[in-house]
Image (cartoon, coloured by chain):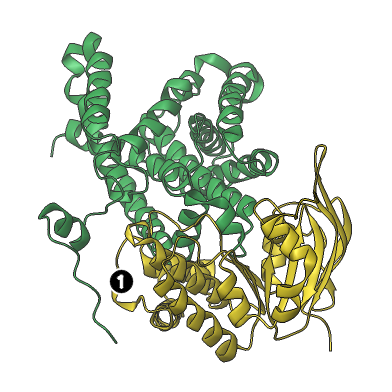
Chain colours: A green, B yellow
Amino acid sequence: MSAYTEGIITLLMINAIAAMGVCLLTGFTGVFTLGHAAYMALGGYATAILTVKYHLHWLPAVVAGGILAIVVAYVIGIPTLKLMGDYYAIASIGLGEAIRLILENWQSVTRGARGYPGIPTFTTMPVAVGFFLVLAFLLFCLLHGSYGRMFKACRDDHIAAALLGYDTARVRVLSLVLSAFYCGVSGGLLAGFLSFIQPVMFDMLKSTELTAVVVFGGLGSLSGCLLGTTIITLVTELFRPISQYRMLIYGAVLVIIMVLRPEGIMGQYEFGPKLFRKLFGRKAPAQERR
Amino acid sequence: MAFALELGGVNKFFGGVHAVNDMSFILQEGELAGLIGPNGAGKTTIFNLVTGVYDVSSGHITLFGEDITNHKTYEVVRKGIARTFQNLRLFASATVLENVMTACQQHHRYSFLEACTHLGRWRSVEREIRDRSMTLLERVGLADRADQTATTLPYGHQRRLEIARALALEPRLLLLDEPAAGMNPEEVQDLNRLIQKIHADFGLTILVIEHHMELVMEICPHIVCMNFGALIAEGDPEHIQGHPEVLKAYLGEEVEE
């Protein structure tokens, strides 16, 4: 496998980890976000500083990046997620910009807008694939069971969910905190892949891309969000030779999908028997009576 | 013995509208009671006040001797109230079975770690939740529809599903908000039997809001009647049927010539 292909796969895994985080929050819990690149930035810079300045091993550094993202998400989430509606989305825009500006201006720690160089390149393809597989497995398991039903209940009807005894504000904070962890880890891996990060990588464009990928793949479908990430990453990579038209094609793909399939590529379906029954137009067989 | 539910001098204002006016009534434990009144009398508002969807303006509400005035909805529910809605509130993306499981899992839990890995108790607890939910679906006659998306069910079945979902919370007090709305007479009869069976089998206290007078008169030995947010009569069906205030509220007043 050429180094170029390995690079694309590594990048794909990193993007997929962040997208899974947003998928949990936006797709399954119904909270829109336009600032999740901020959590990637936190994870990235925490990893960079811990490995370069404090010579920490990269594995605890990446985990620490994820934990820092959790702490910040918790602080932001408590006041904003108590309110229903799009308050978090608005707050997340502010958070995203605030974090980016802090990183740009806190010269002594982050080295400012010029970026943070010299990060050890620990994110090889096996590392990225390993992280992806573990995190995807954990999220898949979590979503298939009580927690998945709880998140979806809060998304579908928060009053009904409260009347089933769920503290919906706490459920949303839990979802945010977990999604921030995924983005933080993704940012840490990105730092170890590029060996150089700068604040502008984690701007509003990156945040909207994360949310777009999830909507594009299908809200409430984990495999849809992974498929969406793959398509978007490949589109941006394959058209690198005609780089000035890349964003044009990216935009066109998004528009075409949204026009043809407003519910996203996968809708709410996952890869599995249920999807195939749906595709071949047969009704789901009624469950056998016990 | 403590009362199942006690409302004491409850008032509720929406801006200048006095939606509930000094309501007081008591439900004994194990009662099957009805709450009736013309449209806009404030019946659903009472349910919303009891379940903490709205805060009361003044007065107090106690559940089995415990004060629940202005408690948060999920706290009240965890103390043992479950309710259904006049305008159905099923989880639209979930199947019939998943709707019930979402409620049922409150009493069958596993840790976050077990949820992330499907190890430990996960398998056995999930099976418990599924089996218990299926049992409840059989009770309301929806077992053969378990895998259908909830909102594709016929209206009457959706109401039954809401009842199954409420029962899955293992409540001590069940509030039913117009369970027979939009049903034909045959379905109302079925529902009648269902409510009575549930009441007998689960040993619950039930309060039903209903417009179908036949239903309330037939199954509820204790009826509370309200109009314009205030209590106008309370007692057994004969008492209510003959009560002048009730007749006035429902039929209007005779005009003196």
In the displayed structure, would residue A52 be above or below residue B42? above
| Residue at the spot 45% in from the left edge and 60% down from the top edge | B182
Callout 1: chain: B
Could you say which quadrant of the image residue A6 lies in?
Answer: top left
**Nearer to me, B243 or B20:** B243
| Residue at the spot 56% in from the left edge and 25% down from the top edge | A93
Could you say which quadrant of the image residue A7 lies in?
Answer: top left
Could you say which quadrant of the image residue B252 lies in?
Answer: bottom right
Residue A57 appears in view:
no
The answer to whether A256 appears left or right of B23 in the picture is left
Q: Which residue is mark 1?
A: B145
Quadrant of the snapshot with the N terminus of chain B: bottom right
SS for tag 1? Answer: helix
Residue at the far top: name it: A244
In the displayed structure, would residue A137 be above or below residue A179? below
Residue at the far front: name it: B257
Provide residue A217's location: percent of width, then percent of height. Answer: 29, 39
Provide residue A196's location: percent of width, then percent of height. Answer: 43, 25
- Amino acid type of the residue tagged 1 in the rendering: Arg
Provide residue A19's location: percent of width, then percent of height. Answer: 38, 40
**Nearer to me, B76 or B210:** B210
- For label 1, the crowd category at 10 Å Cα-Cα, with few meaning under 14, some 14 to 19 and many 20 or more, is some
**Nearer to me, A182 or A280:** A280
The answer to whether B243 appears left or right of A251 in the picture is right
Provide residue A37's location: percent of width, then percent of height. Answer: 48, 30
**Nearer to me, B36 or A47:** B36
Residue B255 appears in view:
yes
| Residue at the spot 42% in from the left edge and 26% down from the top edge | A208
